[in-house]
Amino acid sequence: MEFCHENSVLRSQAMQQLEQFILEWQAQRETGTPDFEQFEHKLHEHIMAIEREFLEAELTCYNVTSRQIEVDGKTYRYTVTSSETYLSSAGPITVTRNLYRPPGRGSKSICPLELRTGIIGGYWTPRAARLGAFAVAHMTPGESEKMFSEQGGMKPSRSSLDRLPKELSPHWESNRQAWEAALCAQETIPQEATVLAMSVDGVTLRMKGGDRQAKRERPGKHASGPTGQKEAGCGTVTLYGSDVERLQTVRYGRMPERKKATLQQQLEMEVMSVLTVRPDLKRVLLADGAKDNWRLLAEVDQACGPSPQPSVEIVDFYHACDHLKEGCDAAWGESTARSKTEFERLRKLLKEEDDGAVRVINMLRYHYGRARGHKRKRLKTQLTYFCNQKHRMHYAEYIRQGLPIASGVVEAACKTLVTQRMKQSGMMWSQTGGQAVLTLRSLIQSNRWEPTWELLRAEFRKTVTVRDTHEIFPDVALPDMVSPRQFVFQQPVIVFAHIDQSAISLVA
C-alpha cells in the first residue's frame, strides 16, 4: 500500500506562531521603535518551540511497535503504550511510546525508544544531558538552574541537575580503566616534549558522616584533622618542552581513599601510556615534603619500569621557601627587617647555588644550637625538614637541566578541581556524589570532554531487535524496525510516505 500526504512545515503550529509574531513586530516597527531586546527574547522562544516540534516528530520515529523484542539477548513482550515527557536542549518534549517487559512477576519494563536514542536517566536527551553535565561540573545545581533559566531553552530543575552526574558516574566507574586507556590512546605526544613530570597532592573536604568517631574510640589514639574532614587526592601528569614550557597536562581527582589507591593506579596508567610512545622522556617526580606523596610517586615510577635516564625527585621550591621563611622568623623574629633580609638572601642561595640547601641547613643548625624553649622547637622543625629533603633540593642543577622546580600545576589542580567547586559554604559530600563531580571536572580540565561524552552517551544506547511483527493494534502494519525519519527542510516541504510490509521510509 502506498499513499501520499502533504504536510508543509510552514503550517505547523509553531511556524504559524512565528510568522504571526514577525508580522506583528513589523507592524510595531512601522509605528515606532520597538524594544530590540524584547524582540530577541521572543524570537528565541519561537525558535525553541519550532525545535521542540521537530524533536518530538523525530523522537517518535524511534518508537518500536511489536509484540516481542530482544535486547542484549533477553526477550521482552509488549505491555502498554503511554506518553512521556523528556527534556531536550530546547525544552520539554512529549511523545507516545511503547513499553516492554520480560516474562515473570516483578520484572522492570524497558522503553525501546529510550534505548535506541540514548535517553539518559529516563529524562534527558543526549544533548540536554551533555549541557547539564557540563554545567554542574562548573557550578552548583542551584547556580546551573538559574543559568539555564536565564538562557532560555531547556530549564532543568535543581534536583534533576543534582541527580545527573550521579546517573553518569556509575557507568564511568564500571568502565573507567578501559575508557581512560582509550582516551590516552587517542592523544598524541608533542614532538618537542623533553620532560614528563608527575605530581600528587591533597585537599581536605567536609564529608557526610565523617566525624572520625571510630578513630576516637580506638584506645590510645586521638582524632586528627578537623571533624568530618578527609583528604581528596589530586594528581597531574605534565609534559614540558625546552625552557620548562608546559605543553600538556592531564589532571585526576579522587575522593578520599586509603593510600590514594585509585589515584595511584590512574597515574601509573597515564605515565606508562606516555612512555610507551616516548620512552626517552626525562621523568621528574615533583611534590611537597609529605611522606605519603613521595611514597605514592616512587611506586608509580617503579611500576613504569626502568628509564634510560634516572628519574629525578624534586621538592617544590616554593614549599621549601615557606619552610625557609618559618626558619628565618624563628631565628631573627617574626617578620622583622632582619628576618626579611636574611630570607631573601638565603632564598636566592637555595635556588642559584649548588650548595644552597647545605648553607640553609648550616644556618638553621647554628641558630638551633643557641635557641631555647619554643624558638628551639620551631627551628628544629624546619631543620628536620631541610635535612630530610636535602637530596631533592639541588635547584641550581635542575635549572641547568631545564627541569621544573615548582609543583604549581598540581597545586592549581587542587584549587580548580576541588576547592573552587566543592568547598563552598556549607558543602558536605558523600563519596559517590563527590566523585561524580570530580570525574567530570578532571576530564574537562584535561581537554578530554569531547571523547569522554562519546563514550558516555554510547553506554546508554542499545540495539533493539524486533522478533515478532504481527499486529498489536488494529489497522496498523508493523515494520521490522521503525527507522528515524529523514527531513529535508525546504519551503514548501512535501513529504511522501511509502509504506509496505517491511519498512517505513519518509523522503522529502
Image (cartoon, grey):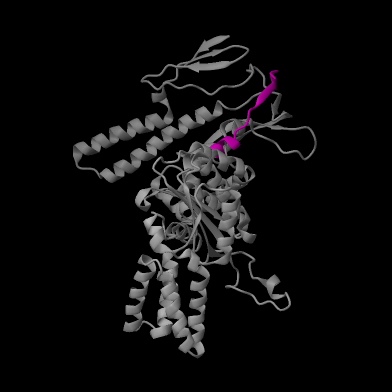
Judge by depth and name the residue closer to the eye, 209 or 328.
Answer: 328
Q: Residue furthest bottom?
A: 372
Identify the residue shown where x is 60% and y is 64%. Answer: 207
In the rendered image, is residue 159 in sight? Answer: no
Quadrant, the C terminus: top left
Was residue 466 drawn as part of the magenta stretch in this picture? Answer: yes
In the picture shown, does residue 166 fall above or below 361? Answer: above
Give the mark count. 0
| Residue 104 visible in this rendered orientation of the protein | yes
Report x, y in % for residue 137. 49, 51
Q: Is residue 325 left or right of residue 267?
A: left
Answer whether residue 428 is magenta in the image.
no
The percent coordinates of residue 479 (x first, y second) are 63, 17
Quick one: which residue is furthest to the top in this view?
A: 1
Q: From which residue to which does the magenta span run?
A: 455-471
Tell me the quadrant of the picture where the N terminus can be found. Answer: top right
Percent across and percent down for residue 382 are 48, 77
| Placement of 196 over or under 498, stated as above or below | below
Give the residue at x 59% y 30%. Answer: 116
Q: Could you tell me residue 178's position as x and y percent?
A: 60, 40
Q: Nearer the viewer, residue 459 or 475?
A: 459
